Amino acid sequence: MSWTDLADVIAAACLLTGAALALIAAIGVLRLPDLLSRMHAATKPQVLSLLLVLIGLGFRLREPEAIGILVLVALFQLVTSPVANHMVGRASFRAGQIDHDRLIVDELSEVLPQIEEPRGAP
Amino acid sequence: MTVVVYICAGMLGLSTLLLLARMTMGPTMLDRTVALDVLTAVGICGVALEAALNRSTTTLPILLVLTLLGFVGSVSIARFSRGSDDIEAEEEAR
Amino acid sequence: MSPRPIPRHRTLQLPVLVWLTLVWLMLWRDFSLGNALFGFAVAVGVCLFFPLPPLRMHLRVRPIPLLWLGVRFLWDVVVSSVLVARATLGPTKNLRNAVVEVNLKTPSDFVLTVVAEMICLIPGSLAVEARRSTHTVFFHAFDVRDEEGVEVFRQRVLAQERRVVRAFGSQTDHLEEVQP
C-alpha cells in the first residue's frame, strides 16, 4: 500500500464524516424547536463538516499550491461563521422573537431596553 | 473513491432537501437566513466533492467566492431585516 | 465617521499589508517574487483607497499558550459538534436553553472580540449581544438543564477568556485574582 493510497483513504474518511456532519446540521436546522437552537446546529456541525471536507480535499489533491487556497477558505469560514450567526441572533433578540418558555435563565431581556450606546455595526 | 463521493453526494442532497423544507416553512425571515447559510456551506461541500472526484483544481476559487457570499448574504439580511414575521403587515401598520 | 480624519499614510500598516500580500499569493497559487511585488503594490493601493481606522491591539504573543489555545479550540469544536449532534438526534421536546450574562475581566477590545468569536464554536454557546463599555457579553447557552448548568457554562466562558488572554494579552495581572 503506497502513501497515495493511504492519503486517499484518509481523504475518503474525512469526506464521509464531513458529509454526515452536514446532514446532521441540516436535520438540526429542520428539527430543533426555536431559532437560537437552530443557529447552534447551523454553526458547529457545519463549520466542522466544512473543515473536514477541505482537509479531505487537500489529501486528495496532494498539490502544495492548492493547500494555500484551502487554508484561506477554512480561515474565512472560521472567522465569518460566528459573526454572521451573531448578527442573526442579535436581530432575532432585538425583534423579540424569543421563545421565553424555553429559557430557564434570561439575563438579557430586562437590561435590553437600557442599552443606549451606539451599536457596533453602522 | 467514486463510491465514497456518491455516498457523500447522496447525504448532501438529502440535507439540501431538509434545508429547503426549513426555508419553505420559515416561519421568520431569520430562520430562512440560517437555512440559506447552511445551504451555502452544503454547496461548498458539493463543489469540493467534485474537485475531489476529478482531482481538478479549477473550481477551487469558487469555494472562496461561496464562503464570502454566504457571509455577506447572512449579515446583510440580519442587518436589514426588521425581524418581523410578516413584512407586509408591518408595512400596513405604518 | 470619525470626527477627526486620519492622515492617509497612517492607514498603511505593515501587518495588514503583509497579510493582504499573502492572500494575493494564495489566490494566484503562484509564489514567485514578481507576483509578490505586484501583490504588495495592490495591497498598498487597497489600504490607500479603502482606509480603515488603525488597530490598537497592544498584543504580546506567547507561542506555547497560543499552541495550547489552538489545540484546545479544535478539540472543543469537535466536542461541541458531537454534543449538538446528540441533541439533534435525540428528543427535542424538552430542550431548555438559557441566556447568560458574563462579565469579562479583560480591558482589551481585541480579546473581547476573539473570545466572543471562539465561544461561538465551543460547546453550547453563541454570543447574542455585547456591550463594549462594560465588557459584558450575553451568551445563549444550548441545552442547559438547571441553574447549575448555567454556572458551569459561565465558568467555561471565563476559562476560554483566560486561555485567550494567556496567548495574546499584554497583561495577565487581572487573571491572578481569579485564580489563586
Image: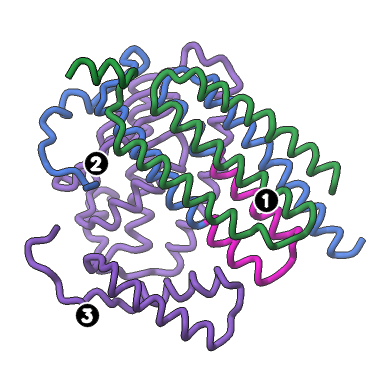
For residue C102, what is the image quadrant? top left
Residue sitting nearer the eye, C167 or B55: B55
Chain letter for the residue marked with disc 3 in the picture: C
Q: How many neighbours does mark 3 have within 10 angstroms: few (below 14), some (14-19), or many (20 or more)?
A: few
**Farthest-out residue, left:** C3
Answer yes or no: is residue C56 visible.
no
State if disc 2 and disc 1 touch (CB < 8 Å).
no
Residue A7 left/right relative to C65: right
Mark 2 or mark 3, which has the lower sequence index?
3
Residue sitting nearer the eye, A29 or C8: C8
In the rendered structure, the colour chosen for chain A is blue
Q: How many neighbours does mark 1 have within 10 angstroms: few (below 14), some (14-19), or many (20 or more)?
A: many
The percent position of residue C162, horizontal first and vertical second, equals 34, 52
Q: Which chain does the purple colour mark?
A: C
For residue A84, what is the image quadrant? top left
> Which mark is drawn over residue B48?
1
The residue where tag 2 is placed is: C130
Residue sitting nearer the eye, C142 or A64: A64
Q: Residue at x 53, y 22 (%)?
A: B22
Mark nearer the viewer, 1 or 2: 1
Q: Give the Cα distance between marks 3 and 1.
A: 41 Å
Q: Which chain does the green colour mark?
A: B
- Residue under disc 1 on the same chain as residue under disc 2: no
The kind of residue tagged 1 is Ala
Q: Give the Cα distance between marks 1 and 2.
A: 35 Å
The residue where tag 3 is placed is: C9
The percent position of residue A89, horizontal first and vertical second, equals 34, 33
- Above or below — where is A61 with respect to C93? below
Residue C112 left/right relative to B5: left
